[in-house]
Image (spheres, coloured by chain):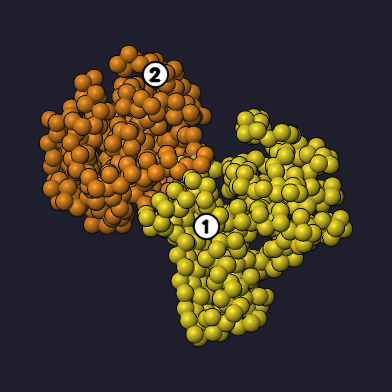
Amino acid sequence: MKQINLGIIGFGNEGRLLLLNSKKLKTARIEAVADLSVKARSRARNLGIPKVFEKYDDLLKDDDIAGVIISLPNFLHEEAAVKSAEAGKHILLEKPFARTVDEGEKILSAVKRNSVRLMVGYDMRFDPVLKRVHDQIADGFFGEVEIAEATNISGGPFSPRNDSVGPVKVPSWWLNKELVGGGALMDLGSHLIDLFIWYFGQVSSVDCYLKYMFRTELDDAATCILQFENGPVATVKVGWFSKGYIQSIQVCGTAKNTLVRLAPESTSSMILKGIVKKIGRGKNDPYSLELQHFVNCLLADKQPQPSGEESMRSLQAISSAYRNAKTVM
Amino acid sequence: MSLVSFVRAQSAEPELLKKAIVESLELIKFDFGKKAKKIVIKPNMCYYYHPSTGEVTDPRFVGALIDVFREKLGASEILVVESDASAMTCKNAFSMLGYDEMAAEKRVTLVNLCNMKYRVVNKTIRGRDFKFHIPELFSEADLVVNVPKPKYMEVVKISCALKNFYGCNAYQNKFIYHKVLDDAIVAINESVKTHLVVLDGLVVVGKYTKRLNLVMSSEDPVSADSAVSQMMGLAPKSIGAIVLAAKKGIGISSFSPVGEFSYFKSQFPSKTLKDDLRATAANIYLQIFSEH
């Protein structure tokens, strides 16, 4: 069976999650990791990664590596993606695509120039339930969709990570608007706006209300109203301000409505998922499916989705939202 | 027995809050005649939680307290202090929790204890050695005020006045003593004395978050914690830090409540045995199914 070698650029929390999910792949292997942190590199070695680099420039020189997964802070996306493209590597770029439309265009230009594949890590598209909703919309199951709503409210970067409990240390770049590009709208809203663009197509207009209750330069609450060229009006509500966690998608059509509650999960559902995952039967994890899709497309020489062009649409919508935003006190 | 007062504030509106604070201090027979020029206030800013969650001391509460101290004690220098922790920096906390704004309005100084001149204090509790960095400003103050939040906390059961002073250690990596936290809490309270506890119970978090409008005062942090633990449905003698602190003479574990203790006991969103079992089950789940 043909197998491709991948490299991970950036071995923080997301990078390690990707490695974990790569173990389920039969047609790809994480051959290399690059990270400036000594601790991260040590962790990678302990996890059996054959090649560990400090600088990703060195990883990109390795001809054995066909593709890279870029899992770096937002302000490093453009440089890493452009360099990866110029090194001839296919790219899975963690969301958000870029901080600005301008950065996104530079990435797209490099990708096109070097004829490599680019996929952006909007993993919600690979949630089986949300994919079913997409297919149902396409099949007319809901009739004409008039209204949709998506909510993701949590502690954002302040939420416990990776099954830990209690306060988490937030890297300083997370609170710097220039480095991160935006707050809750960029971080959480990008997922939901991409999902709705996948569902409903091109956005024709965006209204947006932002709140800054934590007095940083980053929005910690955002409500956007998106109008789509095909008709639906969708509300996207995101926030970094809560100790609780709620995530849901609602689609309302002339024939049928649905409400998908992604969080909080019921206790029994959580335990069942945990057991299924633990015994290695879990095939429905969005991160795994996303990675599998990337690999399958590379092997079949097809364009994985969402592509850079597709992701540019959500970036443009977010950019428009920030431009038109009203601040609510 | 030490006096512990429980007063219901009508609201968080500044004048009403000040009134409630004065009443709570009068009930414990606090000596307003003893002037205090330099006052240090230590609130709880454990993390970047909004004050409306009940997790951190509300800057509006501290603001009202500052007004009372200026009017009643003639305080001319007031410092509001906190220290960096492993997951939190004072720079972010002061800004995000609204303390910067309060300090500018009330003309007080916010202090990151980690930036202050300190002396190294060594303590031994039950054969365990502790080393703390204790800023000099505590010994220079006329009045050191502990402004905690009443919270449940794993391992030590509650976080209140005694735990709040753990933040007086100017050493950032305080987690090094987390495995022996009861002892570390008592050690730090031996090193830095609380002169007055004024608890912010405007919003509390127990089983759930609730607006309680409670102002609680005591001159004894051990009595304060005893009273709070009873209010939260826990026996004081089941709380290691309280028992040990009383043994060490930091305070008295028995207390004499004045004011509306019974009311607040009935209103506090206490956890039940079912909640504890659920939390234990969640921890077991995390241990079994965690992938990291």
**Which chain is represented by yellow in the image?**
A
Dot 2 lies on which element? strand
**Amino acid identity at mark 2:** Phe
Q: Which residue is rendered at x = 84% and y = 42% of the image? A: A63
**Residue A297 occupies which quadrant of the picture?**
bottom right
What chain does mark 2 sit on? Answer: B
Q: Residues within 10 Å of mark 2 (few under 14, many from 20)?
A: some
| Image height of B187 relative to B200, above or below | above
Query: In the rendering, at what x and y percent does residue B53 appear?
Result: 37, 52
Q: Is residue A321 left or right of residue B160?
A: right
**Which chain is represented by orange in the image?**
B
Q: Is residue A16 left or right of residue B219?
A: right
**Amino acid identity at mark 1:** Asp
Which label sits on residue B161?
none
What chain does mark 1 sit on? Answer: A
Q: Is residue B36 visible?
A: no
Query: In the rendering, at what x and y percent does residue A290 appear?
Result: 64, 56
Q: Which residue is rendered at x = 37% and y = 41% of the image? A: B283
Which label sits on residue A220?
1
Query: In the rendering, at what x and y percent does residue B237 appear?
Result: 18, 30
Mark 2, residue position: B130
- Residues behind callouts 2 and 1 on a single chain: no
Dot 1 lies on which element? loop
